[in-house]
Amino acid sequence: MAGNITFTMIKPGAVADGNIGAILAKIAEGGFRIKALRMTRLSKEQAETFYAIHSERPFFPSLVASMSSGPIVAAILEKENAVQAYRDYIGATNPANAHEGSIRKLFGKSIEANAVHGSDSDENAQIESDFFFSGFDRF
Ligand code: CMP
């Protein structure tokens, strides 16, 4: 059965562009409820751990460098069938292929600076949520 929780991160480029508020507004507009929210900055080591699944990919060093280049906003979101619903909502990984009006189309600049991360499975939503938030910080 599909879970009701997903994890998202507003990436450094979108934060640097001043788009935190606009992206959170789009998230709310999509019917996603914020269960946890935090602004922080990933160290290189934390970015490597978070994206460990991609460690053998050629883009991994560049992805780690960009994800640790400035502050991010992490959030746990709730909605029915949250993982798939959010992936559909934010648009394709490459903003050039994302549908009109999607978060990645509106705020993404490249496949790497694609504005937001979204979990790709219920299992990863749990792992990624646990990476950033203790039980005390979830509502
Ligand atoms: P995200 O949803 O955060 O998950 C992994 C990230 O790797 C992805 O968004 C992209 O930003 C990045 N990524 C995926 N494929 C490529 C690629 N071919 N080149 C560069 N970055 C990529």
Image (cartoon, rainbow, N blue to C red):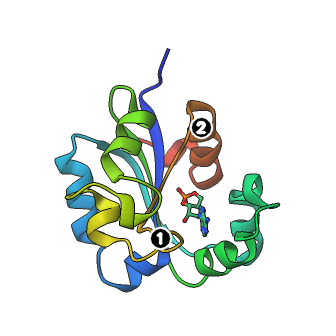
Residue at (30, 65) in percent of width and height: 105
Label of residue 2 in the image: none
How many numbered marks are there? 2
**Residue drawn 46% across and 40% down?**
6
Q: Is mark 1 within 8 Å of ligand 1?
A: yes
Q: How many C-alpha atoms fall within 10 Å of the one at disc 2: few (<14), some, or many (≥20)?
A: some
Q: Residue at x 42, y 34 (%)?
A: 84
From the top left corner, tell me how far across and down residue 42 is, in percent.
Answer: 63, 73
**Residue 2, position in %: x, y?**
47, 21
Extreme residue toward the front, this view: 97
Tell me if mark 1 has few (under 14), some (14-19) or many (20+) residues whose alpha carbon lies within 10 angstroms of its own: many
Q: Position of residue 127 (x, y in %)?
A: 65, 42
Along the viewing direction, whichever of 38 and 99 lies nearer the viewer: 99
How far apart are the two marked residues, 2 and 1, measured between alpha carbons? 19 Å
Ligand 1 within 8 Å of disc 2? The answer is no
Question: In the displayed structure, would residue 14 be above or below residue 116?
Answer: below
Q: Nearer the viewer, residue 71 or 29?
A: 29
Q: Find numbered disc 2 in the image and state the secondary structure of the residue it sits on.
A: helix
Q: Quadrant of residue 114?
A: bottom left
Question: Quick check: 39 left or right of 29?
Answer: right
Which sits earlier in the primary sequence, circle 2 or circle 1?
1
Query: Label 1 belongs to which residue?
Result: 11
Q: Give whichever of 79, 132 is nearer the camera.
A: 79
Q: Whole-percent x and y of residue 29?
A: 17, 49
Farthest right residue in view = 56
Looking at numbered disc 1 in the image, what kind of residue is underneath it? Lys
Which residue in the protein does label 2 denote?
126
